[in-house]
Image (cartoon, helix red, strand yellow):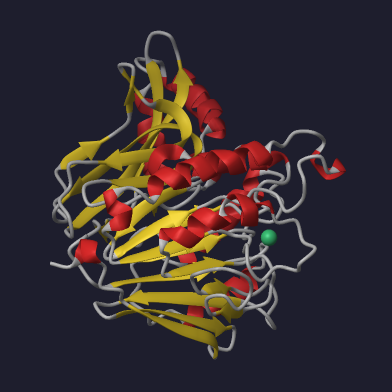
Amino acid sequence: MEKREFLTVALGLGAMSPTLLATATEKKLETTAVAKGSSLFRTAPYLQNISETAATIAWTTRTKCHSWVEWGESEALGNKAQTILDGQITANNTLNKITLDELEPGKSYSYRICSREIIKYNPYGVEWGATETSPIKTFATADASSDLFTCIFFNDIHDQLPVFNTLVKNVAGLDYDMSIFNGDCFNDPREESRVLNLLESYNHGIRASTIPVVYLRGNHEIRGAYSRQWPSLVSNPGGQQYFSMSRGPIRFVFMDCGEDKLDGHWAYSGLNDFEGFHREQAAWLEKEIEKPEFKNAKYRVLVHHIPIYGLNAKAYNPWKTLWGPILNRAGFDISVHGHTHKAIIYPPQTAGDHTYPVVIGGGPKMENGTVTILKASDKELSVTILDTQGKTAGSYQVQRKWRKENQV
Ligand SMILES: [Fe+2]
């Protein structure tokens, strides 16, 4: 490590005398991440937004860098991906979201992330620091022809890593294809360092370098100063916090409920317009449920943090009147939520006028924490809620509806 630091930093110094070189090197080393004994990588890579033909790899660095991904069909790699915007290769940044495209469905790929530190960005010539590469990782692209898909859901962790780590152990032996954090896992994000530490812990727990992860906002991700930057850490289809994606036999629809109180509540200081955001999503939902990807899907799964059904009758619930009628005629097979801190499954109609089963995960304590497993096969969609002891807190099965559209 020491040798690499010296060599890479010294490279940018040109023909200086040994004394000047030593002084300059010492001075510059103070400013570099590696000189402080740290990796350039602030977070390990985490996979976002995987489709049949593309995958986005995200990570952050401790200092400003030029970053890229080396990838290929084997560990020989052979390809290089970087982001180019208006003729400039993205550089002098710390947050990276680099997309590999023109991939093939249902295929395994290898990759590693690479970052080269920028010590000084001059108008004429950049002074480079160390270059760092990660170990090689693998991932698989989506495969619409597959009848099999498994994903795991966490909700309402509220920064409680001991609870999360316990839940992760309960699914350690499970072969899953995607992880979903269904809101309130980042509690009132105030500053970047805390959010990145938590993100790194979550990503490590669910092996996000090899299995894609979806981070959905709950009402707590949108409180605190860093809530304004939090969305930049994720990469969703369409670039927004509500979106849809097809994975295996499932069409997932992700909605963002926003806050759990009216925009005019004093706590929001007049800086929210979630009521407009709800209407925007209602219009989007109307279009989504008419798409062939939705209509022809073997299963349709709805995901949002605050449940519309199963809430206290007096609770703020604008979604029931605005989204409810659309959701009820869409033909969802199941929906998955959090927020109430009480794990429960409502079969259709039992907690209101919903046409689909409603699954709600637990809370942030050892007594009520849960991880939810959703499995699709050619015959059924099954959901199992596990508590921190690994015991089943609820389960439900939905037989596959042989819809006219997807009968072959
Ligand atoms: Fe919540």
Residue occupying image coordinates x 28% and y 61%: 297
Residue 4 shows in this picture: yes
Q: Total label count?
A: 0
- Residue 324 in the image: state x and y as whole percent: 57, 57
Residue occupying image coordinates x 55% and y 38%: 280
> Which quarter holds ligand 1?
bottom right
Residue 236 shows in this picture: no
Q: Name which quarter of the figure residue 107 lies in.
A: bottom left
- Residue 134 in the image: state x and y as whole percent: 34, 51
Residue occupying image coordinates x 45% and y 76%: 373
Residue 88 sits above or below residue 117 on the image: above
Residue occupying image coordinates x 42% and y 79%: 172
- Residue 340 in the image: state x and y as whole percent: 69, 69
Q: Name which quarter of the figure residue 304 lies in.
A: bottom right
- Residue 53 in the image: state x and y as whole percent: 21, 47
Residue 111 sits above or below residue 174 on the image: above
Residue furthest right in the image: 266
Question: In front: 184, or 23?
Answer: 184
Question: In front: 77, or 386?
Answer: 386
Left or right: residue 182 versus residue 221 is left
Q: In the picture, which quadrant includes the C terminus? A: bottom left
Question: In front: 333, or 303?
Answer: 333
Residue furthest top in the image: 124
